[in-house]
């Protein structure tokens, strides 16, 4: 029987580059997005590039907290949450996608040798435990993946 942490790790992998029940995984969808449309502002003020950077920012937050950094923070709806970013060419788009791949690698490396006890451990500098944020990383990715899919399809229309 799997532990709770093993379920979380499975969900992180499945959502990121597996075959999730709801459709495309994060990297499958991102790899279909043409870099020419990632700066298009067609619904509100968030572009595909900005949404992806936001996803990366929150993954970095989780990584820093797992590493014990009590001072690192991302403040909701501020510039370190929604970073203005403009992609100028395909290489920059690939670099941004590599950024989320790197966070996936680091996150899984930090979790591989952990056990369920980490889920009840207090997040450094916060008033909640790791279980809350580790369970929500994949959920956060899926939520914003839906936005990216919508923005991508609206741009193609």
Image (tube, grey):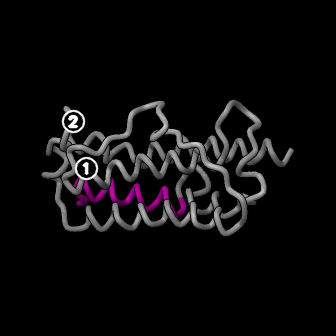
Q: Horizontally, is 23 left or right of 108 in the view? A: right
80 or 119: which is nearer to us?
Answer: 80
Contact (Cβ within 8 Å) of mark 1 with mark 2:
yes
- Which x, y percent locates residue 1? 23, 60
Q: Horizontally, is 74 left or right of 81 in the view? A: left
Q: Horizontally, is 13 left or right of 83 in the view? A: left
Residue at x-position 31% and y-position 55% = 63
Q: Earlier in the sequence, mark 1 or mark 2?
A: 1
With respect to residue 141, does 108 lie above or below?
below
- Which x, y percent locates residue 143? 53, 40
Q: Which mark is residue 142?
A: none
Q: Which mark is residue 65?
A: 1
**Residue denoted by label 2:** 126
Q: Which residues are magenta?
A: 1-19
* Prevalent SS, magenta region: helix
- Which x, y percent locates residue 17? 52, 64
Give the residue furthest to the right. 157
């Amino acid at each position: 029987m799997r532990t709770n942490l093993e379920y979380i790790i499975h969900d992180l992998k499945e959502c990121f580059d597996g075959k999730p029940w709801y459709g495309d995984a994060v990297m499958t969808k991102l790899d279909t997005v043409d870099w020419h449309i990632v700066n298009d502002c067609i619904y509100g003020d968030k572009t595909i590039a900005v949404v992806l950077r936001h996803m990366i920012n929150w993954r970095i937050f989780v990584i820093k907290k797992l590493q014990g950094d009590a001072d690192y923070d991302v403040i909701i709806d501020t510039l370190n949450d929604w970073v203005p970013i403009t992609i100028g060419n395909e290489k920059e788009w690939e670099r941004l996608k590599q950024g989320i791949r790197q966070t996936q690698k680091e996150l899984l490396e930090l979790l591989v040798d952990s056990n369920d006890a980490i889920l009840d451990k207090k997040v450094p500098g916060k008033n909640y435990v790791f279980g809350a944020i580790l369970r929500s990383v994949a959920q956060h990715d899926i939520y914003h993946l839906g936005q990216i899919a919508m923005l991508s399809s609206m741009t193609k229309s």
